[in-house]
Image (cartoon, helix red, strand yellow):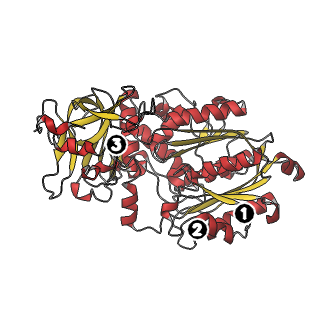
Amino acid sequence: MTRVGVIGAGHGRFGRRSDATVQELAFEVYRMAMKDAGISPDRVDASVIAAVPEYHKQRSVAGVVQEYLNLNPKPTWLTEVACASGSAAIRTAWMAIRSGTHKVVAVIGCQKMTELSTAEILALMGRVGEVQWESVFGTTFPGYYAMFAARHMHDFGTTREQLAAVAVKNHRYGAQNPNAMFQKEVTVERVLASDPVASPFCVFDCCSNADGAACLILADEGTVSELGGDAVWLDGVGCASDAMSVLRRPHLVGLPAAGEAARQAYAMAGAGASDVKVAEVHDCFTIAEIMAYEDLGFCAKGEGGPFVESGAAAIGGQVAVNVDGGLKAKGHPIGTTGVSMAYEIVTQLRGRAGTRQVPGADVGLTHNVGGIGQYCFVHLFRRD
Amino acid sequence: MFSWFGKVSFVPYSKVGEFAVHLKDGRLMGSACSSCGYATFPPRADCPQCLGGEFSFREWSGRGTVYTFTAIAAAPTGFEDLGAYTVAVVDLEEGGRLLAWVGETIPPGEVTIGMPVQVVPRLFEERQDIRVHYTVERPGTTWDKAPAHHTEA
C-alpha cells in the first residue's frame, strides 16, 4: 500500500475572528495549503471537513465550505468526534488514499465558537459528559479534568506548581507564535492566583474556546514523486475509544485510549517514544498534558509532573512538547485543533518554525483527544 | 419516570426509568442481568457481557469510598443558583461507581480521596414536581425508606 504524505499545509490566526465566516476562515487556509503544495484545484479528489456542528448556526457545514472552496462536485464529508474531529479527518483522508480510492485529499479543520452567546455556551458546557447519570449533577468540562488532576495529585504527588509549569511553558512558546490567541508569557504565580474554575484548576489551567482554521493536503506516493518527492510522511496512525461515562473507566489518572492509540501508531511506524523529537499533545487542561507524557511513554506513569518541571518537555529537553503554544496559548477551535497540531509538526519537520524550531526534528507526533478521552488519535509523522 | 432524576433532566425516558421511582422510595438500585447475572451500577437494561435484554433491579447499600472530587466554581445552565458545589466520584461497596453532590454532613474542604461515605437518596423538597437525586454523606447518615412492596421491578 502507498505511503501517505503531506504536500501542503496552511494555518490561520486563532482567536476571536469577527472578521470572517467559517467558510471564509476555511478558504484562507486552503489557499495557503494549495500554494504550498503547488498543485491546481483540479488535482484535489475530495475534501474532509472537521468541525463540531453544535457551535455553528449553519447546519452541515461541509456543504458551505465545499461550495465556497469551489470544489463541487467532488466528494466531501464531515468528521466529528468532539475535540479530536481534526485528527479523525486526517485519519479518514489517510484511509481514502491508502485504499486507492483517492490520490489527493484536502483536510480542512474549521470552527467558529465565539458567535454563541454566553447562555448558549453555558448550556453546552453542561452537556459535555454523559448526560443520563453525570450531567444531572452539574458537571463541567473543567470539572472532569479537575477530578483527574485531584486523583493524579493524590496517587503520584503531582503538585499545583507542576500543573502551572505546563501553562507557563506553553504560554512562553505561544508568545512566539503569531497565529496564537494569547501571545503573552505568564508566571507560575499568575497561574496560581487566577480565578478558581473547578478545584484544583484556576482559569490559567484551562484552554479557551476560539475561532480558527487549518488545512493539510495529503497525497499518495505517486503524486509526491511527481511533485519532486518532498513530503512529510504520515507513517503511523493510531485510534482508540473509551467509555463515555467516567464511571465506567478503570481509573482516572490517565487516558487508556491514548495509550492504545500511541501503541498502534508506534507499531505501524516502526518507531518508539524515544524517537520522537517534537510532539503536539492535547493540553485542553494542564493535567491533560502531564497525563499525555505518561500515556505516550515519554516518561513513566506518575512522573509527568517532575518531567515538565525539569524542562524535559521544552526545546532542548528530551522531547519538545507544544512549542506552538498548545491549546493553552494558541486557543482551541475544537474541530480545527487536530489539523492545527499536524500543521505544526509538518512545519517543524520541514525546519521552518523560526525561533521555535526544534533542532534535528525528523520524527514528530500529534496526540489529539476528543471529550474526556472518549476518542484518542495519535499520528506519527516523519521526514526522510 | 426517568425524567424525575436530576436537578435538570436531559433524559426523560429509559428502560431503567423505574430507577427514579425506587430512588423516591429511598432505594438506590443497580441492575442484574437475568441471563448471566452481570450486576452493575449505574443500572443498565442491556447486558454488555451476554447481550441479554432482561434484567432486574438490585438494591445497593450506598456505602462506598471517595475516588475523586472537584469543587465547581463556574456552573453550567440550570445549576447557577447552587453557589459553589462539590461533586464526587464514589466507588460503591457492591461494585460500580456513581457521581453525586457532596451533601451537608461533609462541610466544604473536608472531603478527601479515600474517605468512607454513605450515598443517600434525596427529594428536592422545594420543588412542586417530583425531582430525585442522591448525595454523598458521612457514614451512618440515615434516611426514610418506603415499605418494601413498592420496590418490585
Which residue in the protein does label 3 denote? A200
Point 51% across, 66% down: residue: A56
Point 14% across, 34% down: residue: B148
In the rendered image, residue A246, in percent from the top left (x then y), is placed at 40, 39
- Left/right placement of residue A139 relative to residue A309 reads left
Q: State the image quarter where residue B58 is shown.
A: top left
- Left/right placement of residue A230 relative to residue B61 reads right
Judged by depth in the image, the label closer to the viewer, 2 or 1, is 2
Number of the label disc, if any, that sits on residue A22: 2
Q: Dot 3 falls on which chain? A: A
Q: How far apart in space, not on screen, are marks 2 and 1 (Cα)?
A: 16 Å
Q: Is residue A85 visible?
A: yes
Q: How far apart in space, not on screen, are marks 3 and 1 (Cα)?
A: 41 Å
In the rendered image, residue A35, in percent from the top left (x then y), is placed at 78, 63
Q: How far apart in space, not on screen, are marks 2 and 3 (Cα)?
A: 35 Å
Quarter of the rendering occupied by the C terminus of chain A: top right
Number of the label disc, if any, that sits on residue A32: 1
In the rendered image, residue A83, in percent from the top left (x then y), is placed at 52, 51
Q: Dot 1 falls on which chain? A: A
Circle 1: element type: helix
Point 32% across, 54% down: residue: B12
Residue type at the position of mark 2: Val
Q: Are marks 2 and 3 in contact (CB under 8 Å)?
A: no
Q: Earlier in the sequence, mark 3 or mark 1?
A: 1
